[in-house]
Structures are given as C-alpha cells and as structure tokens.
Amino acid sequence: MIDFPYLEDLCIRTDSKIIMLVVDGLGGLPHPDTGKSELETARTPNLDALAGRSVCGLTTPVLPGITPGSGPGHMALFGYDPVKFLVGRGVLEALGIGLELGPNTVAARGNFCTVDGEGKLTDRRAGRIKTVESAPLVELLDTIDIPGVSVEVHPVQDYRFVLVLRGDGLGANIPDTDPQVVGGPPRTAVAAELTSERTARFANAFIDAARGLLGSRDRANMVLLRGFSTEPEWPEFGRSYNLNPAAIAAYPMYRGLARLAGMKIITTGADFDAELKTLADSYSDHDYFFLHYKPADGAGEDGDFDAKVARLEELDARIPAVIDMNSDVLVVAGDHSTPAIMEAHSWHPVPLMINSRLSRGQGSDAFDERVCRLGALGAIPATNLMLLALAHAGKLAKFGA
C-alpha cells in the first residue's frame, strides 16, 4: 500500500463515485511505416473529447526501464508498491476462478502450447485455442496422479489453466518453465532455493505426464507453467482508502488481483459489453469500480498492429456508456504498454487521464502517448494514481494544520 502513514486518517467516506477503467496494454510505439502509435492511429473521438475535458499524463508502473507483468501493473494502479506486493500468476488465476487455496498450497498458471517433433516451441499459446477445445484437455490433465502430493487442474479461459499442488513442504520459488520465446524447448522446473525442490520435482512430474497425454496432438500438445506462488495476505484496499470497492472483469486473473486486494467481485459476462451492463446494474451499490478492458493487450502481444488499433476503436465506441454513468471521477489508465512492434509488454510510460469537475481540462485534442507526455499531470509513478483519484472525488482531507 502507499507508503504514507496518515492515509487512513485522511480518507473520507463520501457519496462520490470513482470509476477506474484499466485498458490492458494501453500504450504502444510508432509503426515504422507511419511513425504513429496504435493510439495515434486509432479513430477515438470519444476518448479524444474526454481528454480535452480532463487532466492527462503518463504513469510508470514499476520503475523506469522495468517491464511489468499484469500483476505488478495493476497493483501499482491500486496504490500497492509492486515491488513489495508481488505475487505469481498462479494464485491470481486460482483466486480469479473462485478457488480457495490456504496454507500448504502452491498454484501455477498453465498455458497449453505447441511444440514440434523436436520438442521446440512453435506457439506459446497453442493458437489461443478457445475454452471449448481446452476444457476437455484440462479434464484429461486432471487425471494425473503424482505420489506424495494432491494434484488439481482447473480450467481458466481459452488456452489457460491452473495447476494446484497441495501438500507438506511445498515452496514456490521456481522460475517459469515458459521461456517467453519460440524456437527452443520449454524450460525444466528448477527450484531457486532448497525449500522449493520438492515442488519443482512434482512440477516436472506433472509436465512429463502432460507430455505423454497430449503428445499425439498437432497443437496444444505440451504445457508451460508460470507464476508459481502461494497466497499472501495484503492490506485491504477498501479499508485503506475508506471505500466500498467492486471489481468488474471478464478475465479471471484480474478478478484474482481484485480479490487479493479485498474488493467485491461482481459476476459478469465474457466481454466488455457484459461488463458495462454489470456496471450499470450494480452502480448504486459501491463507490469505487475497477473496470477492466482486455482485448487491446492480446492484439499487442500477437504483434498485430491493425488489430490493436481496431480493439482501441471498439473501446472508444463504448466510452459514452461509461461517461453516462456520471461518476464523480472517471480514470482511464493502463497497467502497462504492449507495443505491437515488440509483441510483448514494455517499460514505456502509459497514457493516463482523470476526469472530474475538479480537473483542469487542458484542451487536448487527442488521447495518446505524445499528448499525454505534455499533460498537466506529467509523468508520475502509477502508485500515486489512487491519491489523485481520491482527491478529485473529494475523498481526502487536508493534511496537517
């Protein structure tokens, strides 16, 4: 949480409402042929008009030059120090699908992937297979039995699953078996410390068994494990800020993040339109909403510049529905940049705008990286965003005499 010992004393409970719309992978880089980023290329009249009535800037999710995962990127936006409050994707995905973990339990996020006849990775996400194809494979993996540990495999979404190991003497300090690049073999699970050797042995046994069960397939014939982790205990978001917060996210991992922070998870559908309906239906029940938009990030990771542009334009078409909620504060932010030309997350600062009756509209004619770089907010640590949101909502008292 924000390193400010007077935080709880300054936060005021009011009737004002905050919507924080997090556009996953929002930032980008210029296309080599046009010199314009995805945001600059996209036709986003609603975001552009909103920027003109808002105060804009850039956020740095972790530290300059540090590329964040989605977990650190989001936790920073919630005001948690992403270096101090670090957790692997395994726990986030598990909590996001409603699992109970507890002590003596390690969770890892699994990807179905594709390897060639030599065991070299050709696709880290198995063509982003849909849940209808992956669910039977998860059921198959859930039959794996490893002496000495309880093994559970649960479906998450599309090509993703969760591996849960329960038993004594399990540590979670194990690097990912996903090498993050294709052309070579998946990594072996190797314990980074003695207390995790037992877990690494079980993980490798699971991988070997999965290879045997899936190996005859043309795609989704192998698995990658990421984010080995145990469930931590963190300060509650709502208590720290004197808020009644809720999270609306179609993707399980982001529900897991919000659950770790102690937010109310509101059940929603599988896309952003469903999220918007859920927001409208539950708007009177909470004073802070974390609203998540995923599609732009996936397009960026796939290296599809035009698709990311299209996903941003689709978001823009739905911005009026968010504005129509008449929240006292509307924040549009991103957890990290995902430039299509890099096909990955990056360290580049992320566009931000805050709209409220207390924001000084700066007359910007666009919402993109270049305009936000010149914005009145400047470049700020993402961990400072919640303080600004609270202040613009009239939820922070004066500090000092």
Image (cartoon, grey):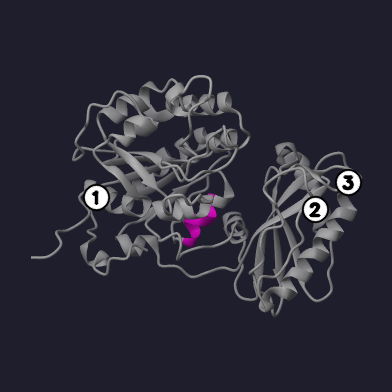
Residue drawn at x 39%, y 33% is: 369
Residue 118 got which mark? 3
Answer left or right for 329 relative to 305: left
First in sequence: mark 3 vs mark 1? 1
Residue that mark 1 sits on: 15
Amino acid type for the residue under numbered disc 2: Glu
N-terminal label among 2 and 1: 1
Distance, label 2 to label 3, CA atoms, is 26 Å
SS at mark 1 in the image = loop
Asked if 22 appears above or below 154 in the picture, the reply is: above
Q: Which residues are magenta?
A: 254-260
Residue at position x 49%, y 58% from top? 259
Disc 1 residue type? Answer: Asp
Single out the mark in the foreground, 2 or 3.
3
Asked if marks 3 and 1 touch (Cβ < 8 Å), the reply is: no
Image height of 139 relative to 349, above or below? below
The secondary structure that dominates the magenta segment is helix
Rendered image: mark on residue 139: 2
Name the residue: 57% across, 57% down. Answer: 92
Circle 3: is it few (<14), some (14-19), or many (20+) Cα within 10 Å?
few
Q: From the viewer's side, name the closer residue of 3 and 10.
A: 3
Alpha carbon separation for disc pair 2 and 1: 47 Å
Q: Nearer the viewer, mark 2 or mark 1?
A: 2
At x 48% / y 55%, what residue is drawn?
A: 72
**In the figure, 396 relative to 181: above or below?**
below
